[in-house]
Image: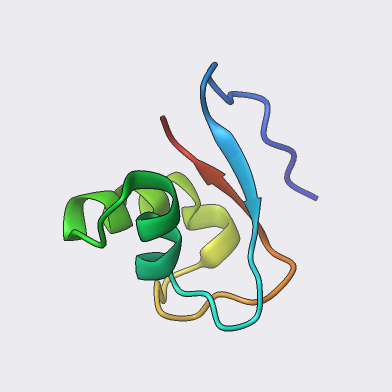
Amino acid sequence: MYVRTDMKSGAACYTVQSGDNLSSISQKFFGDMGANNVNRIYFSNLNTIGPNPNLIFPGQKLYIPS
């Protein structure tokens, strides 16, 4: 089990819901679906998401960088 211990102040933890994708999560937290913010979320959660950024699952907990 991987436990994140390096969360910075102002960061958030988000539980993926059915129908979510990284773009929609980026919109919720950053106000846009730009590639920079999507990549920030993806690369901050590479161990959780794996090699395919288009494949996330309900219930996954993602670190949202500030």
Q: Quadrant of residue 48?
A: bottom right
Residue at left offset 44%, top offset 35%: 65
Position of 7 compared to 46: left or right?
Answer: right
Residue 66: horizontal and vertical position, in percent?
41, 30
Q: Is residue 29 above or below residue 23?
A: above
Residue at left offset 47%, top offset 55%: 46
Position of 39 compared to 16: left or right?
Answer: left
Residue 51: horizontal and vertical position, in percent?
42, 71
Front residue of 22/24: it is 24
**Badge count:** 0
Q: Is residue 11 above or below residue 61?
A: above
Hey, which residue is sitting farthest top in the picture? 9
Front residue of 10/48: it is 10
Residue at left offset 54%, top offset 16%: 9
Position of 35 compared to 4: left or right?
Answer: left
Q: Quadrant of residue 44?
A: top left
Residue 28: horizontal and vertical position, in percent?
44, 55
Task: Please name the colour scheme applied to the rendered image.
Answer: rainbow
Residue at left offset 55%, top offset 75%: 56
Position of 52 compared to 37: left or right?
Answer: right
Front residue of 24/22: it is 24
Residue 60: horizontal and vertical position, in percent?
69, 63
Front residue of 55/1: it is 55
